Image (spheres, rainbow, N blue to C red):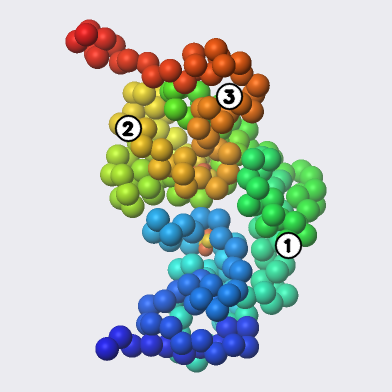
Amino acid sequence: MNETVTLIIDGEQVTVPEGTTLLEAARACGRDVPVICYHEATTSEGLCRICVVDVQGSRRLQPACVTPCQAGAQVETRSERVERTRRTLLEMLGAAVDLTHAPDLQAMSADYHADPERFPGAERREHPLHDDNPFYIRDYSQCVLCWRCVQVCGEDAQYTFALTLTGRGYDTAVSTAFDISMTESPCVFCGQCVGVCPTGALKPKIEYGLEQGWTPDMLRQNTRRRRSPKAAEEG
Ligand code: SF4
Ligand code: FES
């Protein structure tokens, strides 16, 4: 028989199977805990910290997506300190990254009354647009470094390993190895990275073209599958 643990979430008693995370338990009882790096299809790494919750007796807030439920724990999902922390994280993100094409993050920012203008001197992440294949564009100026695309490209799904993290600290970015183009990389254009990206950093080429006002001819031209030189040689 599976062991269970019973804890209190926002004053409500909850019983869940052992190993359940605080995020899963909170969701099971209808609490809306925001997430950015967490995705059902990837391994949680607790990177973004937006899902933090208050566990009574714990000096630090705990990331709900990677913290297992403990029997008898008393958890608050929207305490004052949780709200303040989430607001600050969203403000820092909004100050550094272009979130124009991230409706979920915009809604989250509105919910927490985040004001990115509080960090007027913050350095904006600027990256050139990568338009190197017929299927999708990469605009890392809109990347929140959630790591989901790297995970699905790697051991969590595709085992292709076309994407990786480069740089350090503030200069950390997602890229192909040695920044080669997607067509030179091992990418098989499965589209899983685009599917899990929570912002406009990875976007289908057609969607991008429509946003840019491309004509049908331009759309056809820019999304046509180019044959590799090897395939062309082989006829
Ligand atoms: S490109 Fe998208 S999925 Fe990949 S790390 Fe950036 S925001 Fe996350
Ligand atoms: S969603 Fe939990 S740390 Fe990012």
Q: Amino acid at mark 2?
A: Val
| Element class at badge 1 | loop
Residue contact at pointers 2 and 3, CB within 8 angstroms: no
Which residue is the site of mark 3?
Answer: 209
Numbered mark located on residue 188 in the image: 2
Q: Which residue is mark 1?
A: 112
Q: Is residue 105 at least partly visible in the picture? A: yes
Q: Between residue 216 and residue 186, name the one nearer to us.
A: 216
Q: Nearer the viewer, residue 171 or 83?
A: 83
Q: Is mark 1 within 8 Å of ligand 2?
A: no
Circle 2 residues within 10 Å: few <14, some 14–19, many ≥20: few
- Pinpoint residue 117: horizontal percent, then vertical percent: 80, 48
Image position, residue 16 (x, y; %): 43, 83
Residue 102 position within the rendered picture, expressed as x and y whole percent measured from the top left? 63, 45
Q: Residue at x 56, y 31 (%)?
A: 207
Q: Earlier in the sequence, mark 2 or mark 1?
A: 1
Of tags 1 and 3, the one toward the viewer is 3
Q: Is residue 177 visible?
A: no
